[in-house]
Image (tube, rainbow, N blue to C red):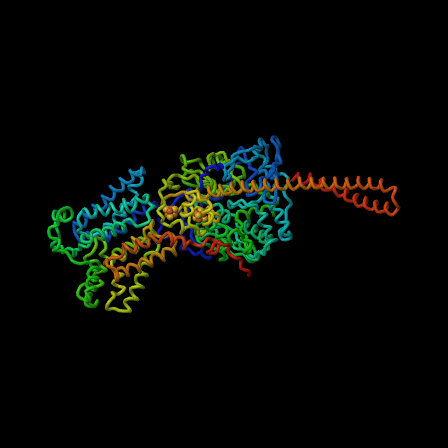
Amino acid sequence: MNIPAIISGPHTHSRFSVTETMFMVMICLSPATAMGFYLFGWPALFLFAVTLASALVFEALCLMLARKPVHTYLFDGSALLTAWILAMTLPPWAPWWVAVVGAFLAIVVGKHVYGGLGQNMFNPAMVARAALLIALPVEMTQWIMPVDLAITPGFGEALAITFGTPPAVDAYSGASALGYVTAELSAGRPLSEIMGNSFDVKTLFFGNVSGSLGETSALLILAGGILLMAMRLITWHIPLSVLAGAATLSGALYLANPEAYPSPFWHLTSGAMMLTAFFIATDYVTSPASNLGRVIYGAAIGALIVIIRTFGSFPEGAAFAVLLLNGCVPLIDEYTRPRIFGRTRSGKPLEIADE
Amino acid sequence: MKLFSLSSLKRSTGYSIRGGVHPETRKHLAAGCAIEKLPMPKLLRVPLQQHIGAEAAPLVQRGDHVLKGQIIGKARGAVSANVHAPTSGEVIAVGPFTAPHPSGLPVATVTIRPDGEEKWGKRLPRLRPEDASADEIAKQVLEAGIVGMGGATFPSAVKLGLGKRYKLHTLIINAAECEPYLTCDDRLIQERPEDVADGIAIMAKALGTARVVIAIESNKPHAIEAMKRYIRQAGPGAEVMAVPTLYPMGSEKHLVQTVIGKETPARALTAELGVVVHNAATAQAVHKAVRYGEPLLSRILTVSGHGVERPANLEVLIGTPVSDILDHCGGLTGEPERLLLGGPMMGMPIQSLRVPVIKGTNGVLALTARETRRKESMPCIRCGKCVASCPCGLQPNELNLRIQSDDLDGAVDIGLMDCVSCGSCSFTCPSNIQLVQGFNYAKGRLAAKQSQKHQQEETKRLAEARTAREEAIAEAKRKAMAAHKAKQEAKKKAAAAKKAEAEAKAAAEAQADGAEAASQDAPQQPAATPTEAAE
Ligand code: SF4
Ligand code: SF4
């Protein structure tokens, strides 16, 4: 059969392209990232740089191996964004090789093994994070207290922290909010006591706490997320349903026993929850395409995070929750197809109602 | 990137539709240009297929002299349209010419060299719409060769006859003009509102609709204003509705949903909901045809894009070559990235400047690379923007996936045939995937397959019919033979029985009579076959 190749419309296009989209997401991430640099000093910046650089190297290698045009794809921003998000979830003073291993896991295992851009089923940054959490439980939970500016490691010391043998990390280290609460809870202390003398929701929200590089300030992440929605890069469906899912479940638990379960506010004001809601769960490739699907997917992630935080052995459940739901996306997509114009949900033409 | 559009703040009404996109309208390029009449071109190439349906049959030959308004192509079949000579002159060729038809294939075209005298031939009889019946109006529109001038080019007379089959209550005039750049309907309504209003009243009469809604996008306040001033002439039940500025507002079923809030069922006509949609330019053509007996000879179109020196709104004769139009507008500013007939969303690219404009051509656009923003395609990143923008509730990404893997049936299962090719998905796709291109290709292949299957079935049916006929003939012959034998036998018997008693003789005669009757029947059947075979 010979069908002449006709150029179909449209003959104009919106301004959005993949590259611009990715870079705009990065812009929205930068306030929280900058806060991370400010709180944790030079080592955080080094770690961040190493993650991004090694991700680009792995991306280039994979593209060459797959014989894809390196030029077009390398700077499409997708590898950078993946690495950026991964870096934000690392402990800020982790040694350089954690970043390199993480970038390898994200770019090679998480993305190119599946066939590259758009083909991966699981969020590459979360693949890397989950694998690191399981493989390197010690390095991945070396939290430090935000650096008192008076004792900020100098440039040279910072180099040593990231690239050499850490001199005296213990001097700075402290538990992350999540880790601390989980540990104390399992030690049987009532929550009011734990919360009372260590964290309050406000510091958690503004970010002056120990934690991952970019996950400390829920407020700045929220600001970036709102910007993301304002620029129409994402819709409200996933972030809001993640937060709603988490709030509903944790609220129910809290009402049942306020002494054993932290309040919903404590969950919602954590940077990790915000980052997941606005930047991780919303990853285009690994989330459902229809709005209904997005709501289901988001709510399930939110609830799952609370479950893992409360009942699981890991203090942070975002990575696992997201990966689990990534696996369900094809199923969700299948059952949440939008209704076709002029047809019922099952695909039959609508009935004509008599007047 | 648009954070919000100003036009969406302007007052608009109507029920909401799903999806849609907000391309930059770029209407300012031509919106301020009053309609100009294009000087007579040196040649007119009038295709005999300017509409959906069967090609018109040519009525003229090379060397004939034609008069303005003379019919040169006769509508063939129920869905077709007459074609008229746009001016007086000499027919210098009748033959295939590359037409502005989606297929890009040549169609029969009458080439006329105008003599410049504009001598009118016989006009159609004028009608007084006040006294004319619905049938008379529809017939006049049919004779005048009017088709949907928004670009759909469906013969208008067929749509005006829908009142006979359906109970209609609303006529919607589509003046949304949702395609970027185009301003011809806008200008038409601003400059000739009384003509449009009169045409609308005539159409409403033919359709028997009590309510008339003139739908104009909210970004055309002047047109809304002008139409409101003449609204009384459009009929007692007429109103102007400022519909939201959203592409594809002008899509028939989506406009109906916006205006009356009802979704037309798949594969059904809007008429089944009691609604018929006609274009504003069509209304003006109907006005001219009914009041003055003028067939459709010219149309208004927008020449625009940064690729033309001087954007304009022109009134041109049907068959005017694109080159004449561009010359009048100062030519091209350079090599355009895309040269289009129609709007940028659904218009058709043309390769040659010699192609003529036809009844459905509402724009001639020369777009620069900055306007087309063509980029290399990237893999789908599943962002879902196409899904959110599809006004038909489809999943273009999924459709594309299935078509790419050659699963056409799978694509049909998830709604390929419900796609209206509006282009919203491709427009918004950040990966610049040519989604619509793929859909049109798939639809083409399915149509080809369908017609092949149809042909096969047709062949099979004919073969079976032939076998049946042959069997019938054989059967008839056998019967005839049997009857003949019976007769012979009867005769023999009769001869043998001559010696027999008188009672026996009478019985034999009775038997012969019966056989005779049978032999008379027999030749009838074979006689019927030649006519059947002729089918
Ligand atoms: S808009 Fe393009 S990239 Fe996004 S899901 Fe649709 S086809 Fe894929
Ligand atoms: S072209 Fe088809 S699939 Fe794409 S938006 Fe329009 S109707 Fe939907």
Q: Nearer the viewer, residue A64 or B364?
A: A64
- Is residue A303 at least partly visible in the picture? yes
The residue at 21%/64% (across/down) is: A185
Which quadrant holds the C terminus of chain B?
A: top right
Q: Which of the 4 image quarters holds residue B154?
A: top right
Q: Dividing the picture into quarters, in which one does residue A187 lie?
A: bottom left
Left or right of A182? Residue A301 is right
How many discs appear?
0
* Residue B38 in view of the camera: no
Q: Position of residue A132 (x, y in %)?
A: 23, 51
Q: Is residue B299 above or below residue A273?
A: above
Q: Establish if A206 lies above or below A57.
A: below
Residues B310 and A313: in front is A313
Q: Residue at x 37, y 51 (%)?
A: A330
Q: Is residue B461 above or below residue A34?
A: above
What percent of the width, then of the height, locates residue B199?
A: 57, 50
Residue B101, image x, y percentages: 51, 39
Image position of B305 (left or right of B522): left
A322 sits to left or right of B452? left
**The one of B484 and B132 positioned closer to us in this rendering:** B484
- Residue A257 point in image, percent of width and height: 26, 69
Q: Is residue B535 left or right of residue B299?
A: right
- Residue A256, placed above or below residue A172: below
